């Protein structure tokens, strides 16, 4: 057995609390599905969806985990509480707080893709939290994969990240979560690929042997730290967290404290539940080391400590990395507001942001000088676009300003900005295009190495340089570049970056798009609207081929006369419009533009709708 962390106290032998951490799409949720199935969480005739833990609609559509979730399986006499964490750095706030509930982690790495930026991100968080680690080399069934080199790469990365000696002595398993097997050696894993009869028992055994049970302080006063929240229409708010000391019973009187200087708030636990498979079961008592759900405490928030009223001893608050991107959320003021959804009033928008901030701890919001506009900060464009998409699916309309990075100052008063690690894998023939794109955006090369017919490139790049980069790179490389990013640090300001060279094509009046007008203007640029779509004055309907804004009339119809033409009218052929996704639209707009979001449409518009206003207040 590997060395255990220092300062180990008495530990429970009947519980293991583990997190599963990895880069996006390396198979975390698929492995959790297999653990649940083989751990008996589902009965034999139950039909199971793939990625059962990805219960959120956006998670299923995007194919990524956004919200950290809990489940539990029984392996013999041992109860395993499992936390499935997001792999994308934009959802790092979810990772940071749920790792506090675990004593160990499975580090999942794709045998083909190897160690990618989010692997580095989540691994650093696990090391900082002091977790015991098990390396799971997944997807060894992929063609051309190199599982034999993964162990050394993870070891080198952990050394670089400052892991302790006992963390560097990590065991390794090889297998395939999709095929439902893991083995202690690569040779055995390859044999299972051929025979197809393996199980996850070697992984279960390894978790029991290597991951320490939770420390037990049975005689200490109660300390339960809330790491997640849930809501139920019948019982209201529910706090999810781990008991670090003492015990808790259903019906017990407690107090809730927010931070070391918080004022204790008295309350009573009405119900006590624990996770069982994908569901929950009610219990009467829980002890130190258990992960539980408590109801009846309406004011409880993430990072709060639930204590005994006579001995309120708060735990240190969960540290969360600061936001790096901010944008404005405002009430929709377009001329066609209310046609496709429910326009949010300023008080509705404010209440929605308050509710989100209680659960989404990495998000911040603040009021601005305008009563109907709020400034919202987050870990990245994807982080905030998930919130916008959720509001959109609630049938709400709102308008969003261009993303801006959050600058800071160093001790000498110099401006600093967020710097990110960008990793690009691209075919050799396109590598020079990628280099040009990155260098234009103030990137600095860190690593350049050949991988077969591919180039593996690593850059440090300002967060500003990433806005709109993904689409530009896919266009330049014919869709063959793979880009992954991760926040590195705040570094010296690197100078101006030109965001978008091309000007906008702006609608001159309100109405509907007419085919005749659109056809005659097609050679002037790229359009975002189609025939028959509603328009309003000041809407951005396309991208000009030149670097200046151009105002056009797309509602102009063909003039009818009684003069017969000498030949047949020319057939009108309309080029299909370019439709932006929400993230594309947010990264595309300039500072004098907004994204109008409704349940049915994503439109671009100018902040000032009329031409006179733009000349007077903004860019003409």
Image (cartoon, grey):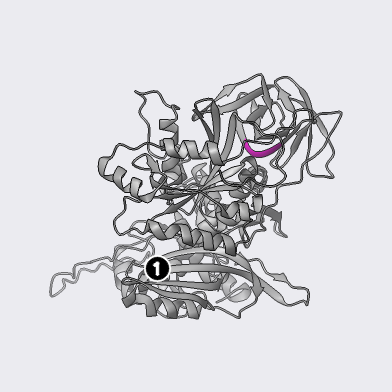
Q: Main secondary structure of the magenta part?
A: strand
Residue in the picture at 37% in, 64% down: 555
Q: Any magenta on residue 33?
A: no
Q: Secondary structure at mark 1?
A: strand
The mark total stands at 1
Residue count near mark 1 (Cα–Cα under 10 Å), binned few <14, some 14–19, many ≥20:
many
Q: Quadrant of residue 285?
A: top right
Rendering coords of residue 152 (x, y %)? 47, 61
Is residue 351 rendered to the left or right of residue 80? right
Q: Residue furthest right?
A: 310
Residue at the far front: name it.
Answer: 1
Residue at horizontal 12 percent and vertical 73 percent from the top: 567
Place of residue 177 in the rendered image (x, y in percent of width and height, measured from the top left): 39, 43
Magenta stretch: give its range: 225-229
Q: Is residue 43 left or right of residue 276?
A: left
Residue 211 visible in rendering: yes
Identified at 71% across, 55% down, the residue is: 367
Instruction: Compare residues 19 and 507 and report the one nearer the observer.
Output: 19
Q: Position of residue 105 (x, y in %)?
A: 55, 45
Residue nearest the observer in this picture, 11 or 130: 11
Question: Relative to 111, is 215 on the left or the right?
Answer: right
- Quadrant assignment for the N terminus: top right
Q: Nearer the viewer, residue 163 or 489?
A: 163
Q: Is residue 235 above or below residue 61?
A: above
Q: Position of residue 78 (x, y in %)?
A: 55, 28
Residue 591 visible (yes or no): no
Q: Which residue is mark 1?
A: 425
Quadrant where the C terminus is found in the figure = bottom right
């Amino acid at each position: 057995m590997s060395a255990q962390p220092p300062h180990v106290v008495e530990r429970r032998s009947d519980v293991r609390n583990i997190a599963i951490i990895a880069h996006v799409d390396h198979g975390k949720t698929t492995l959790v599905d297999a653990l649940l199935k083989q751990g008996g969480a589902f009965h034999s005739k139950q039909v199971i969806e793939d990625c059962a833990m990805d219960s959120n609609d956006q998670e299923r559509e995007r194919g990524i985990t956004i919200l950290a979730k809990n489940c539990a399986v029984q392996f013999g006499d041992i109860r395993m509480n499992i936390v499935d964490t997001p792999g994308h750095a934009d959802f790092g706030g979810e990772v940071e707080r749920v790792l506090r509930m675990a004593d160990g982690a499975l580090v999942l790495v794709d045998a083909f893709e190897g160690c990618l930026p989010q692997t580095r991100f989540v691994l650093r968080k696990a090391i900082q939290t002091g977790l015991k680690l098990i390396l799971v080399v997944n997807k060894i069934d992929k063609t051309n994969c190199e599982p034999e080199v993964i162990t050394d790469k993870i070891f080198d990365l952990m050394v670089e990240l400052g892991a302790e000696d006992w963390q560097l002595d990590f065991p390794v398993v090889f297998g395939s979560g999709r095929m439902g097997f893991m083995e202690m050696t690569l040779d055995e894993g390859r044999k299972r690929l051929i025979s197809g009869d393996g199980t996850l028992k070697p992984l279960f055994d390894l978790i029991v042997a290597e991951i320490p049970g939770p420390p037990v302080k049975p005689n200490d006063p109660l300390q339960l730290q809330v790491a997640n929240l849930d809501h139920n229409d019948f019982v209201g708010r529910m706090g999810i967290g781990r008991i670090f000391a003492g015990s808790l019973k259903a019906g017990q009187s407690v107090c809730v404290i927010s931070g070391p200087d918080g004022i204790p708030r008295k309350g009573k636990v009405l119900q006590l539940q624990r996770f069982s498979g994908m569901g929950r079961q009610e219990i009467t008592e829980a002890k130190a080391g258990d992960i539980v759900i408590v109801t009846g405490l309406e004011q409880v928030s993430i990072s709060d400590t639930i204590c005994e009223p006579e001995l309120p001893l708060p735990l240190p608050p969960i540290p969360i990395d600061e936001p790096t991107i901010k944008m404005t959320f405002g009430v929709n003021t377009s001329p066609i507001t209310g046609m496709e959804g429910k326009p949010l009033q300023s008080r509705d928008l404010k209440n929605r942001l308050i509710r989100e901030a209680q659960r989404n701890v990495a998000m911040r919001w603040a009021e601005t000088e305008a009563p109907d506009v709020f400034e919202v900060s987050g870990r990245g464009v994807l982080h905030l676009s998930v919130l916008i998409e959720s509001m959109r699916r609630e049938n709400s309309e709102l308008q969003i300003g261009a993303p801006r990075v959050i600058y800071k100052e160093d001790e000498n008063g110099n401006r600093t900005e967020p710097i990110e690690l960008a990793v690009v894998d691209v075919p050799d023939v396109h590598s020079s295009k990628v280099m040009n794109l990155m260098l234009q955006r103030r990137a600095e090369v860190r690593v350049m190495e050949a991988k077969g017919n591919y180039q593996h490139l690593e850059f440090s790049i300002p967060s500003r340089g990433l806005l709109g980069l993904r689409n530009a790179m896919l266009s330049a490389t014919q869709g063959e570049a793979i880009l992954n990013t991760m926040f590195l640090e705040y570094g010296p300001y690197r100078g101006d970056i030109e965001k978008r060279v091309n000007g906008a094509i702006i609608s001159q009046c309100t109405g509907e798009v007419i085919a005749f007008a659109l056809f005659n203007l097609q050679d002037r640029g790229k359009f975002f609207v189609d025939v028959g779509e509603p328009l309003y004055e000041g809407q951005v309907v396309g991208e000009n081929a030149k670097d200046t804004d151009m105002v056009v009339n797309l509602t102009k119809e063909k003039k009818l006369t009684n003069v017969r033409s000498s030949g047949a009218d020319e057939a009108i052929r309309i080029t299909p419009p370019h439709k932006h996704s929400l993230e594309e639209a947010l990264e595309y707009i300039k500072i004098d533009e907004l994204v109008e979001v409704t349940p049915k449409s994503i439109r671009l518009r100018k902040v000032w709708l009329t031409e006179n206003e733009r000349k007077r207040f903004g860019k003409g």
